[in-house]
Every structure is written in structure tokens, then in C-alpha cells.
Image (tube, helix red, strand yellow):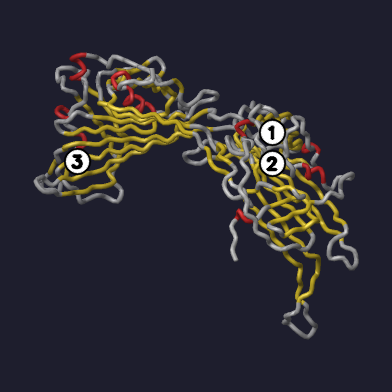
């Protein structure tokens, strides 16, 4: 059947023995080749179009930040688990994870992952993966078909297993200004946008289209925090600090209703302040870290 | 009057070459003519013959036409083979292949570069042409290449992956002028050298004092899997380079030199078409 309605197109991620179906709100898969025109002097027009690099694919999707998963003792969804595992990895070899949706799947390498959390709002995340293929394995395989899956937890548990700004205070990201004289000011955090991007280095060789292996190289992480305090004393070389974000759902009684993320040696690199009609003056600061 | 690149055809030995670029240089050998009592002069006299170079890059679509000149010039039985060139109507007829190279890269179209040195004046007038490009079906691609090695170069560890490299050939050609000649009646061939460098995996420091015998062969296949061209260097491993940079992997390159052209002899086992425009009809 070629026509598939969205309710039959779930997005699943599998890595080794663990897997998870995400609460995705959209899902886009691209596959491209690199046919380039070649020209010769003395001739008008192109000689034809010919491949100049390997076929490559990518997938991106937005999803509700679910907390009900649990992988190797770490609470939260599998994407957060993967991002955490890759950025803290001391190894260079990257194996990729299987991303499948609507009958199409591929081995993807996490390119970027982000989420936002704001007061009284459901947290949403997004992720993108690149499909390089491997050896004789195509970047993307399969065809559009139904793929139904049960969301993690299911039923009533689902509603409480979603990160929400109501019980996510983000106090670890508060700015404190201490001008001296015991007149310290502590900011109120209204929301935060988190993102991390990863760089991979696929290694291609002669006589083979798809890479022999793919190496993970570096990652850049940032958190944009919105609050109500402005720190004009941004230092030339800010002090590095660790920042932990705990995302909570609505089930305050549950100890498992939590997803944690830790930025290591983050530094504040910018601060800004803006005012608009009918609103308080809000400020933003950006924390970055690299791995 | 200006012309575009599509107005000038490149022909070598009357065969059109599908070149992506070409350059033609011509120079004289003038020396200032000083007198004993003068430190300035506006007079120049020729001290050597006129000559130039034709350099171009072209796509490989089959058996490489130019590779035959590696062993087809300066060898005892074929030393009279010369190359004639024509670029937009400007032509010469006393050329010799002095350099040739092919870069190997994963999934890239195969292309070669060649330099023909000639010892002659350019004749003819520039004549613009207006023709549509032929619709060729094949440009060989290194996705369909097979790299193999023989020898002691990898003695210290197994090498499984050949990432990319280059095959280079250079020849020394000198004109021999007789009295009253401005165009040499013959040329003398100096040493011919082939070197091949390749990026490989498995970093190693293995490099004996006397080098190591090494032979690397690159078979270039068409879409049907038939070998249509081969680049071989059978010589000695003389250099290793290992390095890396932030965000990159550790790269190791080896360089093999061959003081001759024995391994570069042209074979056309598959009977593929030559890399000239006349053979660009659709083919598998």
C-alpha cells in the first residue's frame, strides 16, 4: 500500500539491545546522490551528469520529550541517552543507531539534538541523523509502509511521562549577581533551549561507495537561558562550571519521572536583554561547552 | 575579440580530447646583447630554440590515450613517435609527453592531467567553433576501482584500506639542434620516473634503510566490472608520512618510486574504447 496516514508512521530508534518508539510529531527522510555536470572545452553544454561522491541520507524529526524510557540506568528517552553517551565518549569509533519510520530505515549518526523547556509548557525535542551507509549497505533501505508501534508506557502513564515546565524549575541555571554588601540577586528562569551538535568523519576508500568506518570527532553544546536578571559583568574569560538540567514530568510522586542532562565545563559566552510592549524585561545568557 | 571555453577545441594527434581545461604557453630564449663598453642594452638575441608547453586535464572514459605515450616515446622502437597538438586552431607537431598524472579519490570521476612539451613555433590562426557537447554515457569512477599490492611495503602490519592517492609520471626531454636549425631534428630522452603515493590505514613506521620493494596496482573498471585501465607502480617504498589534525583522523601516506616505466605498459585486455571524443558513443 503506497498511501500511509500519519498514525501509521511511527519513529523508532534502536541501538544494540535497546530501542524506543518516540512520540514524534513529524518525520522527514532525505536521500540524495551527487550527480554533477561535467563540461569540456570546445563543446557547448554538458557532457552529462556523473556522480562525484557517495549517496548520503538524513533524517530529522521533532518529538515530545518523553521521560518514561530507561536505558542502562539512565532515565529519559533514547535520544538523550545517545547524546549523553556520545559526548562523554572517549572513543572515536561510532557505530550509529537504526532509525526506522514508515517502513524506511537506516543506520544514522546523531548530528544534532535539542529540546526546549518553558514555564507551563510541554517540552519538545528535535533530532537529526545522517545516513552514510556502510560497506555495501545503502544509507536508506525499505519502502513506505505502515509501521505501527505502541508509545512507551502507553495510556495514562504517557501523560505524566512527558517533560513539562511546570515542575522543571531549572534552578541550576539561575544567574546570581553579588555586587557586595549582602545584596545578592538571583534570577528567575523562565525557560531554556538546549542543543548539541556532533561532528562525524566518515572515511571513504577506493573501490567502495560507502564509508569503511565513521569516526566521531567533536561536539558543541549550548544552553540559552531566559531569565529576568542581566549580568553586565561578563568576563573576558568566564569561569567554567558544570550545569545539570533535571527535566521533570507531571507525576511529582514518581522518582523515575525525571530526565537528567549535564553540561561539563560550560562557560557563559553571551548575555543580552530585551524589552517589549506588555511584557517584563527579559534577559538571555548563553552557556557553551565543547567535547 | 573574446571567446568562451566552448569555442576552442583541443586536439592531440587529430583526436579531440574532452578536457576540462587547457593552457598553452610559448616562449623564446632571448639573452640581452651587451657590448664591452656598455652596461645597458635594448638588443636581444636568441640563445636557444623556441618552444612551449600544452597542459590540460581530461576525463577518463576508457583506455587512456595518453598513457600510451609513457612507454611510446623515448623507447628504442618507437622513439620517433611525436605528439601534435591543436588548441583552437593554434597547432604544433613536435610534442613529447613530459608529465602525466592521475589523482585517485573515493567516488570521484577519473581524470588525468598531462603536459606536452614541444620545440616548435605555433602555427595557424585561432578559429572559434560552436558545437554541442557529445552526450557521453560513461566517465570512469574510482568507486569501481580495485587496489592491490604486492611486496614488502606492508610487512609491519596488514593494510586493508586504500583511501586515495596519485600516479605521477615525468620524463626529461631535451631538444638536439643541428647548425641552422630552429626546430630540433631530434630529441634526447632523459630519465623517466613513475611515482605513486597512496593514503592507507594502519599507521606504521616501517621503512628500512634501503627502502622496501613495493608494487601497487590500481585497476579501473567500467560499470560492467571489466578492467579498462590500470595504473601500476613497481618500485621501492621510499617515504612515509603520518599526520593528523583536530577533527581529522590519522592519515598515513606512502610514496613508491619506480625509475622506469616497465610497470606502466599499456594493456587493453578488455578492449575498451580510448579516451578520445570519437569513441564517446554510448556504452555500458
The x and y percentages for residue B11 are: 72, 51
Please tell me if label 2 and label 1 are on a single chain.
yes
Disc 3 vs disc 1: which is toward the camera? Answer: 1
The CA distance from mark 2 to mark 3 is 58 Å
Dot 1 alpha-carbon crowd within 10 angstroms: few under 14, some 14 to 19, many 20 or more: many
Residue B9 can be seen, yes or no: yes
Dot 3 alpha-carbon crowd within 10 angstroms: few under 14, some 14 to 19, many 20 or more: many
In the picture, the quarter occupied by the N terminus of chain A is top left
Near-viewer residue (B159 or B189): B189
Label at residue B167:
2
Q: Are marks 2 and 1 in contact (CB under 8 Å)?
A: yes
Q: Residue furthest bottom?
A: B37
The CA distance from mark 2 to mark 1 is 9 Å
From this view, report whether residue B99 is shown above or below residue A104.
below
Q: Which residue is mark 1?
A: B218
Q: Which residue is mark 3?
A: A226
Q: Secondary structure at mark 1?
A: strand
Amino acid at each position: 500500500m503506497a498511501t500511509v496516514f500519519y498514525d501509521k508512521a511511527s519513529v523508532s530508534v534502536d541501538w544494540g539491545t535497546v530501542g524506543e518508539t518516540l512520540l514524534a510529531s513529524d518525520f522527514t527522510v532525505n536521500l540524495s546522490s551527487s550527480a554533477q555536470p561535467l563540461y569540456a572545452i570546445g563543446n557547448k553544454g554538458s557532457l552529462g551528469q556523473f556522480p562525484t561522491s557517495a549517496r548520503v541520507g538524513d533524517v530529522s524529526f521533532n518529538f515530545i520529550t518523553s521521560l518514561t524510557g530507561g536505558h542502562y540506568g539512565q532515565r529519559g528517552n533514547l535520544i538523550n541517552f545517545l547524546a549523553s553517551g556520545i559526548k562523554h565518549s572517549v572513543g572515536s569509533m561510532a557505530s550509529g543507531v537504526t532509525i526506522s519510520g514508515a517502513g524506511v530505515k537506516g543506520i544514522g549518526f546523531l548530528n544534532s539534538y535539542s529540546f526546549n523547556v518553558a514555564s507551563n509548557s510541554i517540552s519538545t525535542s528535535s533530532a537529526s541523523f545522517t545516513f552514510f551507509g556502510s560497506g555495501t549497505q545503502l544509507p536508506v533501505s525499505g519502502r513506505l509502509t505502515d509501521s505501527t508501534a505502541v508509545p512507551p508506557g502507553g495510556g495514562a502513564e504517557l501523560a505524566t511521562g512527558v517533560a513539562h515546565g511546570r515542575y522543571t524549575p531549572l534552578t541550576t541555571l539561575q544567574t546570581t549577581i553579588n555586587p557586595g554588601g549582602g545584596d545578592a540577586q538571583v534570577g528567575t528562569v523562565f525557560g531554556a533551549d538546549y542543543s548539541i551538535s556532533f561532528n562525524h568523519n566518515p572515511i571513504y576508500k577506493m573501490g567502495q561507495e560507502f564509508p569503511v568506518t565513521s569516526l566521531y570527532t567533536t561536539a558543541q553544546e549550548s544552553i540559552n537561558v531566559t531569565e529576568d536578571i542581566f549580568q553586565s559583568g561578563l568576563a573576558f574569560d568566564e569561569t567554567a562550571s558544570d550545569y545539570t538540567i533535571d527535566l521533570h514530568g507531571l507525576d511529582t510522586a514518581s522518582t523515575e519521572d525525571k530526565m537528567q542532562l549535564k553540561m561539563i565545563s560550560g562557560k557563559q559566552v553571551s548575555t543580552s536583554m530585551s524589552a517589549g510592549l506588555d511584557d517584563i524585561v527579559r534577559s538571555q545568557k548563553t552557556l557553551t561547552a565543547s567535547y | 575579440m573574446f571567446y568562451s571555453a566552448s569555442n576552442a577545441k583541443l586536439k592531440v594527434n587529430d583526436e579531440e580530447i574532452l578536457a576540462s581545461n587547457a593552457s598553452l604557453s610559448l616562449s623564446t630564449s632571448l639573452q640581452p646583447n651587451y657590448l664591452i663598453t656598455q652596461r645597458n642594452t635594448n638588443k636581444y638575441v636568441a640563445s636557444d630554440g623556441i618552444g612551449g608547453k600544452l597542459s590540460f586535464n581530461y576525463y577518463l572514459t576508457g583506455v587512456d590515450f595518453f598513457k600510451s605515450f609513457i612507454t611510446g616515446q623515448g623507447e628504442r622502437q618507437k622513439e620517433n613517435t611525436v605528439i601534435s597538438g591543436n588548441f583552437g586552431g593554434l597547432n604544433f607537431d613536435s610534442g613529447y609527453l613530459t608529465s602525466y598524472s592521475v589523482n585517485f579519490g573515493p567516488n570521484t570521476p577519473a581524470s588525468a592531467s598531462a603536459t606536452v612539451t614541444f620545440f616548435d613555433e605555433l602555427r595557424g590562426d585561432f578559429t572559434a567553433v560552436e558545437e554541442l557537447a557529445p552526450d557521453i554515457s560513461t566517465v570512469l569512477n574510482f568507486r569501481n576501482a580495485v587496489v592491490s599490492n604486492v611486496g614488502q611495503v606492508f610487512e609491519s602490519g596488514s593494510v586493508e584500506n586504500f583511501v586515495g592517492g596519485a600516479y605521477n609520471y615525468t620524463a626529461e626531454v631535451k631538444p638536439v639542434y643541428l647548425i641552422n636549425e630552429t626546430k630540433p631534428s631530434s630529441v634526447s630522452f632523459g630519465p623517466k620516473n613513475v611515482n605513486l603515493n597512496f593514503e592507507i590505514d594502519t599507521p606504521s613506521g616501517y621503512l628500512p634503510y634501503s627502502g622496501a620493494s613495493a608494487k601497487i596496482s590500481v585497476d579501473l573498471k567500467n560499470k560492467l566490472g571489466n578492467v579498462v585501465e590500470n595504473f601500476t607502480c613497481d618500485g621501492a617504498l621510499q617515504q612515509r608520512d603520518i599526520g593528523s589534525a583536530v577533527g581529522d583522523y590519522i592519515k598515513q601516506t606512502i610514496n613508491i618510486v619506480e625509475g622506469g616505466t616497465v610497470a606502466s605498459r599499456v594493456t587493453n585486455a578488455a578492449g575498451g574504447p580510448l579516451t578520445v571524443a570519437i569513441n564517446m558513443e554510448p556504452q555500458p
